[in-house]
Image (tube, helix red, strand yellow):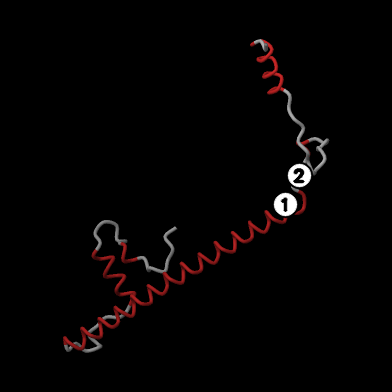
Amino acid sequence: MISFTSLATNAILWMATPSPEPTIYPEFEGDPNAVTPGVIGFLATLFIALATLLIIMDMNRRVRRVRYRELAQEAIREEEALADEQALGGASATEVDTDPAAADDTAAAEDPADGRGDDDVPPTERAD
Protein backbone atom coordinates (compact mmCIF):
# COMPACT_ATOMS: atom_id res chain seq x y z
CA MET A 1 0.00 0.00 0.00
CA ILE A 2 1.22 3.53 -0.84
CA SER A 3 1.28 5.99 1.97
CA PHE A 4 0.22 9.59 1.64
CA THR A 5 3.68 10.75 2.69
CA SER A 6 5.47 8.85 -0.05
CA LEU A 7 2.93 9.99 -2.63
CA ALA A 8 3.38 13.64 -1.60
CA THR A 9 7.16 13.28 -1.59
CA ASN A 10 7.16 11.76 -5.08
CA ALA A 11 4.84 14.52 -6.39
CA ILE A 12 7.04 17.28 -4.96
CA LEU A 13 10.20 15.70 -6.38
CA TRP A 14 8.54 15.18 -9.75
CA MET A 15 7.47 18.84 -9.94
CA ALA A 16 10.78 20.19 -8.62
CA THR A 17 13.01 18.28 -11.02
CA PRO A 18 13.06 19.98 -14.44
CA SER A 19 13.15 17.77 -17.43
CA PRO A 20 15.91 18.65 -19.85
CA GLU A 21 14.59 20.13 -23.08
CA PRO A 22 16.55 19.50 -26.23
CA THR A 23 17.71 22.72 -27.91
CA ILE A 24 19.24 23.48 -31.26
CA TYR A 25 21.42 26.30 -29.99
CA PRO A 26 24.13 25.90 -27.36
CA GLU A 27 23.62 27.71 -24.07
CA PHE A 28 24.98 31.27 -23.96
CA GLU A 29 27.93 31.49 -21.61
CA GLY A 30 28.76 35.21 -21.92
CA ASP A 31 27.59 38.26 -20.02
CA PRO A 32 23.98 38.99 -21.05
CA ASN A 33 24.49 42.71 -20.25
CA ALA A 34 27.31 42.99 -22.81
CA VAL A 35 25.18 41.82 -25.74
CA THR A 36 24.39 44.53 -28.33
CA PRO A 37 22.26 44.47 -31.48
CA GLY A 38 25.34 45.20 -33.59
CA VAL A 39 25.53 46.75 -37.03
CA ILE A 40 22.33 45.13 -38.27
CA GLY A 41 20.34 46.55 -35.36
CA PHE A 42 21.85 50.01 -35.92
CA LEU A 43 21.02 49.91 -39.64
CA ALA A 44 17.46 48.77 -38.93
CA THR A 45 16.97 51.61 -36.43
CA LEU A 46 18.52 54.12 -38.85
CA PHE A 47 16.20 52.94 -41.63
CA ILE A 48 13.13 53.35 -39.40
CA ALA A 49 14.24 56.84 -38.31
CA LEU A 50 14.91 58.00 -41.88
CA ALA A 51 11.63 56.55 -43.14
CA THR A 52 9.76 58.35 -40.36
CA LEU A 53 11.51 61.62 -41.17
CA LEU A 54 10.69 61.33 -44.88
CA ILE A 55 7.05 60.50 -44.15
CA ILE A 56 6.73 63.53 -41.85
CA MET A 57 8.30 65.83 -44.46
CA ASP A 58 5.96 64.49 -47.16
CA MET A 59 2.95 64.92 -44.88
CA ASN A 60 3.90 68.55 -44.16
CA ARG A 61 4.32 69.22 -47.88
CA ARG A 62 0.90 67.75 -48.68
CA VAL A 63 -0.84 69.64 -45.87
CA ARG A 64 0.78 72.91 -47.00
CA ARG A 65 -0.29 72.23 -50.60
CA VAL A 66 -3.89 71.63 -49.51
CA ARG A 67 -3.84 74.84 -47.44
CA TYR A 68 -2.53 76.90 -50.39
CA ARG A 69 -5.07 75.36 -52.77
CA GLU A 70 -7.86 76.34 -50.39
CA LEU A 71 -6.51 79.91 -50.22
CA ALA A 72 -6.32 80.09 -54.00
CA GLN A 73 -9.86 78.73 -54.37
CA GLU A 74 -11.10 81.24 -51.79
CA ALA A 75 -9.45 84.10 -53.70
CA ILE A 76 -11.01 82.88 -56.95
CA ARG A 77 -14.43 82.67 -55.30
CA GLU A 78 -14.03 86.21 -53.95
CA GLU A 79 -13.03 87.50 -57.40
CA GLU A 80 -15.97 85.73 -59.01
CA ALA A 81 -18.35 87.11 -56.39
CA LEU A 82 -16.94 90.59 -56.94
CA ALA A 83 -17.33 90.22 -60.70
CA ASP A 84 -20.92 88.98 -60.29
CA GLU A 85 -21.66 91.83 -57.90
CA GLN A 86 -20.26 94.33 -60.38
CA ALA A 87 -22.23 92.80 -63.23
CA LEU A 88 -25.49 92.81 -61.26
CA GLY A 89 -25.00 96.14 -59.52
CA GLY A 90 -23.72 98.00 -62.56
CA ALA A 91 -20.68 99.26 -60.67
CA SER A 92 -17.66 100.16 -62.74
CA ALA A 93 -14.21 98.75 -62.12
CA THR A 94 -12.92 102.15 -61.01
CA GLU A 95 -15.35 102.29 -58.07
CA VAL A 96 -14.07 99.06 -56.53
CA ASP A 97 -11.00 99.37 -54.30
CA THR A 98 -8.64 96.46 -55.02
CA ASP A 99 -5.57 97.88 -53.26
CA PRO A 100 -4.59 95.48 -50.40
CA ALA A 101 -2.80 98.25 -48.46
CA ALA A 102 -5.97 100.33 -48.39
CA ALA A 103 -7.94 97.29 -47.22
CA ASP A 104 -5.48 96.79 -44.35
CA ASP A 105 -5.82 100.46 -43.32
CA THR A 106 -9.59 100.16 -43.38
CA ALA A 107 -9.53 96.98 -41.26
CA ALA A 108 -7.16 98.59 -38.74
CA ALA A 109 -9.41 101.63 -38.46
CA GLU A 110 -12.46 99.41 -37.83
CA ASP A 111 -10.83 97.51 -34.93
CA PRO A 112 -10.94 99.84 -31.89
CA ALA A 113 -9.14 97.51 -29.43
CA ASP A 114 -5.53 97.54 -30.53
CA GLY A 115 -5.62 98.39 -34.21
CA ARG A 116 -4.72 94.85 -35.24
CA GLY A 117 -7.57 92.49 -36.02
CA ASP A 118 -7.68 89.00 -37.45
CA ASP A 119 -8.15 90.42 -40.94
CA ASP A 120 -4.78 92.22 -40.80
CA VAL A 121 -2.76 89.00 -40.90
CA PRO A 122 -2.56 87.52 -44.39
CA PRO A 123 -3.60 83.87 -44.37
CA THR A 124 -0.24 82.81 -45.80
CA GLU A 125 1.68 84.03 -42.72
CA ARG A 126 2.39 81.44 -40.08
CA ALA A 127 0.99 82.24 -36.67
CA ASP A 128 3.63 80.32 -34.72
Q: Nearer the viewer, residue 71 or 105?
A: 71
Mark 1, residues whose alpha carbon is within 10 Å: few (<14), some, or many (≥20)? few
Q: Residue at x 42, y 72 (%)?
A: 68
Q: Residue 28: percent from the left, percent from the top?
A: 81, 38
Q: Residue 115 falls in which quadrant of the image?
A: bottom left
> Across the whole image, how many numbered discs are drawn on residues?
2
Spot the residue most to the left. 89
Q: Which residue is mark 2?
A: 36
Q: Earlier in the sequence, mark 1 or mark 2?
A: 2
Spot the residue most to the front. 1
Is disc 1 placed on a helix, strand or loop? helix
Q: Nearer the viewer, residue 77 or 54?
A: 54
Q: Residue 93 falls in which quadrant of the image?
A: bottom left
Inspect the image, locate mark 2, and give the three-letter code of the amino acid beneath it. Answer: Thr
Q: Which residue is mark 1?
A: 41
Q: Residue at x 66, y 10 (%)?
A: 3
Inspect the image, locate mark 1, and give the three-letter code of the amino acid beneath it. Answer: Gly
Mark 2, residues whose alpha carbon is within 10 Å: few (<14), some, or many (≥20)? few
Q: Nearer the viewer, residue 96 or 10?
A: 10
